[in-house]
Amino acid sequence: QVQVVESGGGSVHTWGSLRLSCAASGFTLDYHVIAWFRQAPGKKREGVSCIGTDGTTYYSDSVKGRFTVSGDKAKNTVYLQMNSLKVEDTAVYYCATTPSYYCSYGWYAPAEYGYWGQGTQVTVSS
C-alpha cells in the first residue's frame, strides 16, 4: 500500500528554519518521484518542489534559493529544508507521489499525483 507521511511542521519566526520529512512506505524512491505542495487558507494548493529518482530537483519561484529538497533512499524519506522563512510561507505542507522516474513538466500540478499525505502545518510569524 503506497503511503507518504509528513512530519516536522511547527511554528517559527520570520527568517527561521524548519525541516519537513516525507516518509514513504509501500514503494521505493527508485521508482517514484516525490513532490511537496502547500495550501494556505483560502488559496489553491501550490507546488513547491519536486525530486526525481535521479535526484534532479525543481522549485517554484517563490521558494527557489530558500528551500532545498533531498532524498535518503536508505531511509526511504524525502526532506524539505526550509530556510529564511517568511510569513507568506505559512500553510499546510503536503508531500505527494506518483510512479515515475522523473518529475514531469507539470510537476507543480496536484493532478499529477495519485498519493498524498495528511499534511503538516507550518506557521511563520513576524
Image: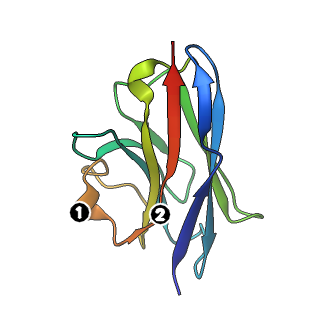
Secondary element under disc 2, as helix, strand or loop, is: loop
Vertical position of residue 30 compared to residue 57: above or below: below
Q: Amino acid at mark 2?
A: Gln
Is the Cβ of the residue at disc 1 closer than 8 Å to that at disc 2?
Answer: no
Secondary element under disc 1, as helix, strand or loop, is: helix
Q: Residue at x 38, y 54 (%)?
A: 103
Dot 2 corresponds to which residue? 118
Image coordinates of residue 94 in percent, x first then y, are 45, 53
Q: Nearer the viewer, residue 108 or 118?
A: 118
Q: Nearer the viewer, residue 10 or 102?
A: 10
Asked which quadrant contains residue 47, the reply is: top left
Asked which quadrant contains residue 82, the reply is: top right
Image coordinates of residue 33 in percent, x first then y, are 47, 61
Image coordinates of residue 67 in percent, x first then y, are 53, 30
Q: Nearer the viewer, residue 77 or 17?
A: 17
Q: Amino acid at mark 1?
A: Ala
Applied colour scheme: rainbow
Q: Residue at x 51, y 32 (%)?
A: 123
Closer to viewer: mark 1 or mark 2: 2
Residue 63 can be seen, yes or no: no
Dot 1 corresponds to which residue? 111
Among all residues in the image, which is located at the extreme right?
A: 74
How packed mark 2 is, by other alpha carbons closer than 10 Å (few <14, some 14-19, many 20 or more), is: some
Q: Residue at x 66, y 38 (%)?
A: 19
Vertical position of residue 13 compared to residue 20: above or below: above
Residue 37 can be seen, yes or no: yes
